[in-house]
Amino acid sequence: MFYTKYSRARRRVGNRTATRLVSPTVAAVRGNPRDRGAVFEFLFKYRPVVFERGELALGLPAWAFLLAVLVIVVAVPSLLRYRAVRGAATRRDRIALSVMRSAILIAALFALARPVLLVSTVVPQRNFLAVLLDDSRSMRVADMDGRARADVLVELLGSGMAADTSRAPVSAGVAEVQPAADAAGASAEGAADVADSALREALEERFRVRYFAFADDAVRAGPATTLSFRGARTDMAAALERAGQELAGLPLSAFVVLTDGAHNAETSLSDRVLSLQAGGIPVYTVGLGRERIAPDLEVRRVELPRRALLGSTLVADVVLGHSGFAGRQVRLDVEDEGRIVGTRTVELPADGELPVQVQFTASEGGPRRLRFHVRPEAGEAVQGNNVRTALLEVATSRRKVLYFEGEPRFELTFLRRAVQEDETLQLVILLRTADEKFLRLNVDDPEELVGGFPRTREELFSYDGLVLGNVEASFFTHDQLQMMADFVSQRGGGLLTLGGRRALAEGGYAGTPLADALPFVLRDPTDADDAFAEVAVSLTPAGRRHPALRLAEGEEASSERWATLPAVSTANRADDLKPAAVALLNGREANGDRRVVLAHQRYGRGTVIALPIQDSWVWQMHADIPVDDLTHETLWRQLLRWLAGDSPGRLRARVSEESVNPGETLTITAEVEDERFLRVNGAAVTATVTSPTGLQMEHPMEWTVDRDGEYTLRFQTDEEGLYEVEIAVAGGAADSEAPVLEGGASGTTHFFSGPTEREQFGAAMRRGQLERLADETGGRFYTADDVEGLAEDIRYSERGNTVLETRALWDMPALFLLLLILLSAEWGYRRLRGLA
C-alpha cells in the first residue's frame, strides 16, 4: 500500500510554509464552546485542529485501477438508465437522480480509497511547554458567575498552584472586587487542596511543563509557588520574552498564557508577536473573565494639557464608560489636593461611552496632581476605575509675546490695556509710526528691537508668541517672511494674525511663505468694497468646547454671552479653510453671508491663529457693554495664553509616564536645541532628580544617537510621592569634545510615584487581543468553558521533537451518515415522484 497526498490549502506560520487541508466546517466551529467541539469530534473522529494541521492522503491498494474501471462500468449504465427513463420522469428528475446516484458512488469510492490524515505530533515527554499565569490585580475581579478569575485559574491547574488573595488591596481606600468567598481568602486557601485538574494532568502527561507567574515580568513558578494576584501592571510582551529566554535552546512546543488579556506596559505586544512569528513558536491563549462587566462606571480617559499658565481657564475632556446605569445622573468632580476646582453633572445615556467636558481654573502654581472621579454607584462591579489622576504643571514664569502693528489704531490700545495686569504675559509692542520709525513699549533693555522688526532667527525666536497687526507684506523681506513661518513650524511658537486693510490678502500676503502657515487660503482681492463687512459673531461647535473662548462658567453660559456681543467689522475675506484648520468663531453679515472670524491650525510644531477682524475693542467700548464688564480682557488674556502658553524652550523635558508604582522604572527624555532652535548632539546633559524627601540624585543623560538632540535616562523610583526632574546643559562644554551651548539651557518636569489603579481600568476580558495573539502566532484561543481540549491541540503544534502519525478517515461517522442521507434522499425522491 502507498499514500498519495492531496494538498488543498496553504497556511503560513512565521517563516514556515506547510500544506494544510482546511475544511469550512473546521473554520466554522473554531473557537466555539465545548458542545459544538464535541459534536464535531463525534462526527469526524478527531478534533478540528487535526484537520487544520493534517495533510490528506489516500491509501490506494494495488487493485485501485480495477476499482476505478468497476466504478466506470457501474456508473455509466446507471446514468444511461436514468437517461432512458420515460413516463412521468422529467428532465429535471433525471438530472436530480443522476446527481444523487453519482454522489453516492463518489462517497463510497472515497471510503474504499482508505483516506487518511498525515499529521505531525510531538513526542511525549520529549518537549517543553511554557505555561504563563497572570498574577496581576485584574485577576481579582469576580465576574465569572460570582467567582474571581484568580479562583478559576487555580481551579484549572489544581493543586500545587495556590492563591493568596486575602491580603489588603494595594491602594487603601479604593474599593475593589476581591475573589469570591472572603474577598477570596477562604476559596483561595481551599484551592491548594484541590486534586490535580484534568488540564494539568493532560499537559504534564504530554510535555515537560515549566510554569511562570507574570505581571510586569515573568518568574518561574514551582509546586510551592503562591500566586498573590497583586501585580500593579501587566506586561505580556516582557513575560513571553523572559519565558522564551529561560527555555532558549530547548525543544519548546508552545506558550500557553492564562490571562484576562490586559497589557498596560510601555513595551509593544505587536513587536513581540513578530518575534514569535519569526521563531515559529505558537501561543495558545486562555481568556479568563467576561467581555463585558456590568454594572460598572469607569473614567476611561482624561485629556488635559500637561502644562498651563497660572490663572488659565482649562477644559478637560473626560470619557466616561458605563454599563447598566442608563438614565442615572452622576457627578464628575475635579479635585486638586482635596479641593474641588471643577464639577459637572451628567445623565448617562444607553450603555457605552459618554464624552464630558469639565471646566476649571489653574489657580495655583507648580505641579498639581488632579483627581477626576465619580462617586461609586450601588452595586457597581469594579470601583477602582472610578478615579483617574492627571499631572498638570502650572507655570508662573512670564511668556513673552511680540505685537507688531503697522499703524496706530484702537485695537493696539485696548489689547495692551486688556493684558497689562496679567503677570504671566509680557506684551512687547513694536509700532510703526512712520517710515523707518518705531515706538517700542515694554522691552527688557534699550537694545531690544532697536532696528525694528527682528532680522535674525535668534532675535525673533527669543519670543514665545507673535501677533501680526495691520502691516503689509511688502514691509518685510523674503527672509523675514520665511523666518516667521519657521518661528511656528520649527521653533514651536504661536502666531496670531489680525485683520485690517493692510493685512492678510488685502496686504499682499498671498504667495508668500507666511501664507502657507495660515489656516485659510489667501486670494488676491479684486474688490475692496466686497472685503469690508459688519458681522454678528457666534461660536462654532468647536468654539463652544475651546477653553480660550470661555467667557463664563460652563459651555452653555459662555455661548449665551457670545450671543449678546455687538457686531464687529472686518476688511478681509477668509472663508476658504484649509483641510487641517478649525473654525472657532463665525460671523454673519446682514444679508446672511457667513464669514470666518476666528480659525486656527497646527503648523509644524506650533499653532497659527487668524482673527481677521479689526475692532474687537468694540466688545469693551460699545454702549451696550457695562463699564465693569471684563469680556474683552478675559478673551484677550485667554487668546494670548493659548498663543504662547505651550511655546517650548530650548530644552524640553518629559517623562514616559506621569504616574508609576514605587520600584518601577520610567524614561526621562530631554530635547536640546541651540539659540536658533536647531538640535544639538553630543552635549553634556545632566538630570538632577529630587525625591519626595528632598534627596537629590544627579545623573548624566545619554544621547540616543537615533534622533538628533534627544537624550534619555532610565530611572527607578524607590519612594512614594512627587519627584522633580531638573535637566540642564551648561553654557560651556563639559569637556573638549562636547559642543558649547551659548547661554546654557534648562528644563523641569515632574512625575508621581505611588500605588496606581491601572489594572482596574479596561478590566473586561480582552478577547480580541488574545485571539489576535493566538492567530498570528499559529496557536488557538480558548475560554474556561472549552479549555479541556488544549493539551490535545498542542500535540499538533509541529514544534520540537515530532513524529508523523496516520489517522484513518474512512470510518468517520459523518461519512456513513452522508451515505445514509444520500441513499434515503434518492429513495424518497423516487417515491415522491412515483418513479420505478
Image (cartoon, rainbow, N blue to C red):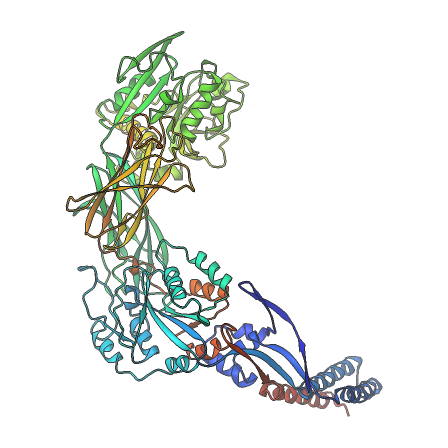
User: Is 149 positioned to the left or the right of 170 in the image?
Assistant: right
Spot occupied by residue 103 in the image (x, y as percentages of width and height): 71, 83
Q: Is residue 3 above or below residue 685?
A: below
Spot occupied by residue 387 in the image (x, y as percentages of width and height): 25, 54
Res. 48 visible in picture: no
> Where does the N terminus fall, quadrant-wise?
bottom right
Residue placed at 82% from the left, 85% from the top?
Answer: 76
**Front residue of 771 and 257:** 257
**Front residue of 252 and 573:** 252
Spot occupied by residue 249 in the image (x, y as percentages of width and height): 44, 68
> Where does the C terminus fall, quadrant-wise?
bottom right
Total numbered labels placed on residues in the image: 0
User: Which quadrant holds residue 571?
Assistant: top left
Q: Residue furthest bottom?
A: 836
Q: Residue furthest left?
A: 693
**Front residue of 345 and 717:** 717
User: Is 310 positioned to the left or the right of 771 in the image?
Assistant: left
Residue placed at 23% from the left, 48% from the top?
Answer: 752
Q: Is residue 241 above or below residue 599?
A: below
User: Is 460 positioned to the left or the right of 183 in the image?
Assistant: right
Spot occupied by residue 227 in the image (x, y as percentages of width and height): 27, 71
Res. 672 visible in picture: yes
